[in-house]
Amino acid sequence: MSYLTYCTTALIISISLFYIYAKYKLSYWKRRGVKTPPTHLLFGNFKDCLTLKKPPGEVMRDIYNSADPDDPYIGFYIFHKPMLLLRDHNLIKQIMITDFDIFPNRRFGSRNERDSIGMDSILSIKQPRWRYLRSKLTPFLTGQKLKNMLPLIEECGKLMLKFIQNLQMSDHNKCEMKDFSSRYVSDVIASIAFGINTNSFDEKKNAFWKNGMKIFQGIKRAITFIIIFFIPEWCPLTEPFIKEPAKYFREIFWDSMNTREKMGYKRGDLMDSMLTLKNGKQNPIYKFEGDNLVAQLSSFYIAGFEAVSNVIAFALYHLACHPEYQTIVYDEIQTHLTGKELTVDLINEMSFLDCVIFETLRLHPPLPIIDRTAVRDYELPGTGLILEKDSSIYVSINATNQDSKYFINPHDFNLSRLDQIEDKKFYESLAFGIGPRSCIGQRLSMLIMKVALITILLNYTLYYDTDKKMSLNGNDAIHVFTYAADGLHVQFKKRCNMHE
Ligand code: HEM
């Protein structure tokens, strides 16, 4: 046999073997009687995400929509790995809440032994260490702790207001909302988590913000996040992109922690709580020392920074497009605050403001996908389907919360729909995840978002830039987090009576 014939035969055999292997792997759901959308031989159902054509949130929405309206779930594959996307509200609650003990872990997360910050953060850690860690971090965010943090957040609100005032003076009264809100949120997190005062609106004092943006921006970072979320087995490949942010967080953290310890002062922030844990009695299950300390505040930063700034940006944009809602929310804020100081209790009474945020979260959940992995075989109630140990289930937050089965004109920003929704509590909280492992920062983020909206709306009216109106559907940037690809452009106009 000639060399060429030999190579051709080997190639044909390899391709045939791969074909048989792939076909068998991709028949996993069919063999169990579960529907799937049409599947690609190599990429499974994630081709558009893995080739960077569509953000994963949109790919998952397509999978969700390819099922029939009443299907409780649909199967899909990432490469050849089978996953199940849940669609039915009761099934989602059953798995994420009632049967949490069988689904306590995420598939998402660092698997790189050399990335101690990623591996041991609350975002990636597995049971039983997770439950212990969560029980130690929950007291960081009690009602009283949030009250202590309010003045620190308000300080950052003042810097933001000053920036808008300067915009007005320069006759350039419009800006891109995500860029704008990310500066405010960066200042807030620098202050309440790392205990440092920054001013991200000032080009000379915005290193913290710039470093934060570097973690999320750019195609390499987008790919890193896609790997961490959907192909965590590949995490070691992301090491070059993780090293630099990890080094930065370590420096910031230890600078602040060492100063705090030396000077012995308290600020009422998360660093105070971390110091108490560090100096408290240690349990071998999880010791609060070294990178374990850095990991928690860094994960608060990673989880909070993009999410909170995106919601503020989208909320401001929608209010700019809906002057009728702006008037109602302004009146509500005025009524509560006239002659009074801003307090957490007063903020919590502003129910229309809540509606603005929940409707924004329904349309633009910053993290559109959540997942869990089974620690043992599990029979899905009422279906007879057995999920094998280590298989993963997903919930598409955006598709579930914009399903036309539950919402009329689901893509419209409509604040009057809220009274008519049956499962209101489920939909209001879904953007923060569900069950014992849902977002630990929900109340904190509501506070940060509300302070921003109150501060701006009391002093300015918002208009959208007619030249740069966002197309509301299918215009997301390629990233795990939800972004408006072309930005959100809003104009500020000063109100007659300013409340600085
Ligand atoms: C609008 C703002 C935010 C949204 C929409 C949001 C959303 C989410 C979602 C969807 C999850 C996954 C939940 C699940 O798997 O069921 C999550 C987890 C988490 N979030 Fe948030 N988040 C926000 C802000 C914050 C902030 C400000 C912090 C900082 C304290 C934070 C810290 C965390 C942490 C630590 C987890 C992991 C919890 C655990 O595994 O026990 N988030 N968040």
Image (spheres, rainbow, N blue to C red):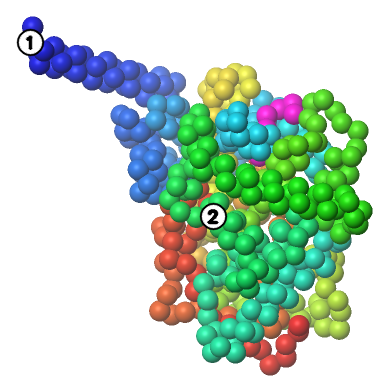
Q: Which residue is mark 1?
A: 2
For residue 159, say whether it is visible: yes
Tag 1 secondary structure: loop
Residue at the extreme left of the image, as rendered = 2
Q: Quadrant of residue 170?
A: bottom right
Query: Which corner quadrant holds the N terminus?
Result: top left
Q: Relative to residue 496, is residue 480 drawn left or right?
A: left
For residue 461, say whether it is visible: no
Q: Amino acid at mark 1?
A: Ser
Specify the segment rendered in magenta.
123-129
Q: Relative to residue 258, is residue 81 drawn left or right?
A: left
Residue at 51% x, 32% y: name it. 236
Give percent across and percent down for residue 261: 88, 49
Disc 2 C-beta below 8 A from ligand 1 = no
* Residue 125 within the segment the image draws in magenta: yes
Q: Which residue is mark 2?
A: 214
Return the disc, 2 or 1, that comes first in the chain's sequence: 1
